[in-house]
């Protein structure tokens, strides 16, 4: 069996910890950006702080592009503000240090939307960096095949035929 052509683009994920205004939580976490390439920083490295917000480098993750999904990537790029979906899973209790594993990063809007139904995972969209836009555009140019839309025709049924629409 032939596997689909795919490309892998490695990105670094940046997450934010913000002081919560809730008596039940100390902090709120969310992905805020991705960096093109694989930064040399170790996962969970603090990279910035301002007021009650701290940024951490969460680690690296691959974006996989599949030739069967080029239509979805094309729609993402054509949207005017291409996005990536970042999915994190909590691996420890609430703390001041990042306690998340990166499950996936995707450029496929359909896959990203489906991942929002996954339950307890943290799913956020972030802006797609220019380098990722360019790599995705090149992948589309190389692998996209326009598929014509074929509207299905309904079968015509003679209403006078026995067995159809009879009441009894």
Image (cartoon, rainbow, N blue to C red):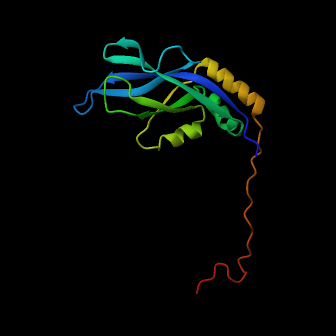
Q: In this view, does 139 lie to the left or right of 15?
A: right
Residue 119, horizontal then vertical, whole percent = 42, 44
- The residue at 67%/21% (across/down) is 134
- The residue at 35%/18% (across/down) is 53
Q: Nearer the viewer, residue 33 or 83?
A: 33
Q: Specify the farthest residue to the bottom.
A: 168
Residue 127, horizontal then vertical, whole percent = 53, 24
Residue 72, horizontal then vertical, whole percent = 65, 37
Q: Which of 34 and 153 is in front in this view?
A: 34
For residue 2, above or below residue 17: below
Q: How many labels does the image show?
A: 0
Instruction: Quadrant for residue 30, please give it.
Output: top left
Q: In this view, does 36 lie to the left or right of 45?
A: right
Q: Quadrant of the C terminus?
A: bottom right
Residue 86, horizontal then vertical, whole percent = 50, 30
Instruction: Quadrant for residue 110, please give it.
Output: top right
- The residue at 43%/23% (across/down) is 15
């Amino acid at each position: 069996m032939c596997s689909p052509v795919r490309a892998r683009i490695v990105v670094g994920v940046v997450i934010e910890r913000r002081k919560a205004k809730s008596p039940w939580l100390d902090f709120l976490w969310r992905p805020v950006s991705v960096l093109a390439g694989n930064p040399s920083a170790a996962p969970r490295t603090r990279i910035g702080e301002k007021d009650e917000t701290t940024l951490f480098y969460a680690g690296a993750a691959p974006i996989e592009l599949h030739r069967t999904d080029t239509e979805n990537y094309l729609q993402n790029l054509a949207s005017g503000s291409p996005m990536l979906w970042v999915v994190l899973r909590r691996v420890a209790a609430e703390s001041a240090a990042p306690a998340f594993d990166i499950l996936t990063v995707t450029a496929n809007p359909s896959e990203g939307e489906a991942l929002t139904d996954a339950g307890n995972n943290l799913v956020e969209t972030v802006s797609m960096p220019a380098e990722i836009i360019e790599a995705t555009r090149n992948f589309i140019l190389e692998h996209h095949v326009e598929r014509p839309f074929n509207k299905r025709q309904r079968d015509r049924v003679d209403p006078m035929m026995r067995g159809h629409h009879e009441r009894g």
